[in-house]
Image (cartoon, grey):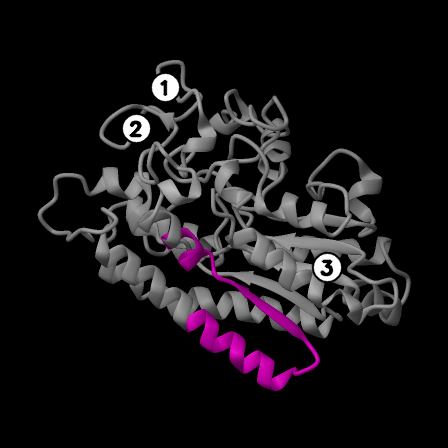
Amino acid sequence: MAKLPTIILILTLLSTCNTYSNGCYTSIISFGDSLADTGNLKQQSTHSHVQAPHFLFPPYGETFFHKPTGRCSNGRLIIDFLAESLGLPLIPPSQGSNTSMVTELGQGVNYAVAGSTALDSSFHEARGVVNTMTNASLGVQLGWFKESLPSTCSTVSECKSTIGRSLILMGEIGGNDYNHALSAGKSIDEVEAYVPFVIKAIISTINELIDLGAATFVVPGNLPIGCSAAYLTMFYGSNKVQYDNSTGCIIRLNKFAEYHNTLLQTELNHIRELHPEVNIIYADYYNAAMQCFHSPDKYGFTNGALKACCGGEGPYNYNLSVACADPSSTSCDEPDTYFNWDGLHLTEAFEIL
């Protein structure tokens, strides 16, 4: 089975480790949504009266942790593999109950929350879209991080030094700004107008972190959402979309993701010009995933790359009314032969590629 996406990212990161006298990064500081959340929404839900999210129940986590951890996968996420490759422990959620893990950057802390958006809730609510999962937008996550600094470092220079030795994982973030709006019935054209605002929010956060001392960022792009089992189900039978004959993905939605990624990379280049001392690594999730969609068997996905392993049946085993972990859902026996875990998220088999 071919191995490529995460391995390339890890090698790129390791090649920059000699920047520091200790040979590598001392911690990972993560922001984002469900593609990076290692348990923040789980912690939030245990302290609220809302119904616990479905990904807090089996079969989530079955492959590696053998229990649900709050990760939206059957196992580990890319952030977990990055931590392992850098010799760091798995990065704890910032909203955890262990105060020492939350308040010390130490070897890392994760602010990513499943369901989060890059834009504040007010932007979406003004357009009639309400995020029922969380209001922990990127701005809120950055606020948590800044609030933690006084308990982590005593002076500005000490904080800058600590942050400068950290790897900042910025996302993926922004996908839910589009997911929530499209699921609420907004047209693709209307949601595409959000993209410049989403990119501005991401870039603004990166610039704030640079001012605080950040020196190395990994900034992932958006995945090819036209290949998502959730969207393939949403538009199934519609005569308004065209499909790529080589992959079965929705062309218009993938063009949308490419637009987001192109604009993001343009703005990242501007930051590189202004801050040549800062390492900014663009993580090309889109093209890494497209290799799998074009040649799923080559990467070990013998059960295909479009159909979800766990879900509510249908042509892509995805049903908005029957989530993975629902008593009436079905789950595959060999998740490592599937690219898609639950319709929206990826199996560990892709994360580890």
Please state which of residues 88 and 31 is positioned toward the viewer in this rendering: 88
Q: Which residue is mark 1?
A: 330
Element at label 2 = loop
Picture residue at 58% right of the left edge, 47% below the top: 78
Q: CA distance from mark 2 to mark 1?
A: 8 Å
Tell me where residue 83 appears, x and y as whole percent. 70, 48
Q: Which residue is mark 2?
A: 317
Measured along the vertical axis of the image, is residue 50 above or below residue 191?
Answer: above
Q: Is residue 225 visible?
A: yes
Helix, strand or loop at label 3? It is helix
Query: Above or below — where is 150 with respect to 207?
Result: above
Q: Residue furthest left?
A: 239
Q: Are marks 3 and 1 in contact (CB under 8 Å)?
A: no
Residue type of the residue flagged with mark 3: Lys
Amino acid under label 2? Asn
Answer whether residue 274 is magenta in the image. Answer: yes
Residue most extreme to the bottom: 273
Q: Nearer the viewer, mark 3 or mark 1?
A: 1
Residue visible at 22% across and 58% down in the picture: 252
Residue type, label 1: Thr
What crowding class fits label 1: few (fewer than 14 Cα within 10 Å), some (14-19), or many (20 or more)? many
Circle 3 residue? 146
What residue range appears in magenta? 263-290
